[in-house]
Amino acid sequence: MPEYEDSVKKRKQGPQMSTQMYMRVSEIHDDTVVLKNGGLRTILKCTALNFNLKSEQEQNALISGYQAFLNTLDFPVQIVVRSKKMDIDQYIEKLKKLSEGQQNPLLRQQTFEYADFIQKLVEYADIMAKEFYVVVPFNPFRAEKANFFDKFLARLRPADSTAEIKKRHSEFEQLKKDLTQRVNVVKSGLENCGVKNDQLSTQELIELFYNTYNPQASRNQKVKDVGQLNLEVN
């Protein structure tokens, strides 16, 4: 009887499916995030402004500029604020190399102790850093006209098919041109508000998603440069 129950449980569970199959993201290339429904996303990383330190006149100018920016948009954008633990590994590594190059033993020891102090301070004080992003979307017409039933069926079939992949590749170039026009509108609008922004590259997009979905592992295991990855084609 126990063996029968175990076999029933296994049939109900079925083969284990990868978590990646349930993610909306299909590919990342050409500085663009490609979704499974064919939609494209460009992500702009923005600098922060200290609004409270501005004069009243400057604050009013920023508000008016932001209002004008929103009025120019005829498409949706997504604003993302991400809090993450401050990563100073590269800074600590630089300090340790400087300490090793010091000729004076006292300066060498002081530099090493300073690096150790900063590392422990960030670790125990749990110092957080905030990052600001604006996501610019563009969806193909077939994705926008999909009804609730179509979206529900897509959720039930999370696996990507070869036909869908080929369709996305054939549509990519034209959709990318339309997306670029939107990106230029958003970039100029933000700059007019005094918000500096940079479009994330393919490498930066991969690192962003990797760090977001793997907050603990990403601190010890960094993402390799995509240009140095060796892909095996069967």
Image (cartoon, grey):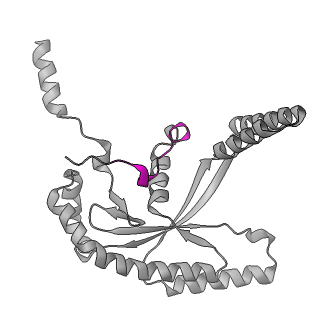
In-image side of 8 versus 201 (left or right):
left
In-image side of 176 versus 112 (left or right):
left
Q: Nearer the viewer, residue 95 or 66?
A: 95
What residue is rendered at 76% in x and 34% in y? Answer: 116
Q: Nearer the viewer, residue 6 or 109?
A: 109
Residue 207 part of the magenta segment: no
Q: Quadrant of the N terminus?
A: top left
Residue 223 part of the magenta segment: yes
Residue 97 position, x and y percent, is 72, 40
What residue is rendered at 23% in x and 49% in y? Answer: 233
Q: Is residue 149 visible?
A: no
Q: Is residue 164 above or below residue 88?
A: below
Q: Is residue 51 visible?
A: yes
For the magenta stretch, what is the residue range? 218-230
Which residue ends up furthest to the top in the rendered image? 1
Residue 231 position, x and y percent, is 31, 48
**Quadrant housing residue 145:** bottom left
Residue 20 position, x and y percent, is 31, 47
What residue is rendered at 48% in x and 52% in y? Answer: 207
In-image side of 69 versus 117 (left or right):
left
**Quadrant housing residue 59:** bottom right
Q: Is residue 11 above or below residue 154?
A: above
Q: Nearer the viewer, residue 164 or 166?
A: 166
Residue 65 position, x and y percent, is 64, 84
**Quadrant housing residue 168:** bottom left
Q: Number of callouts in the render?
A: 0
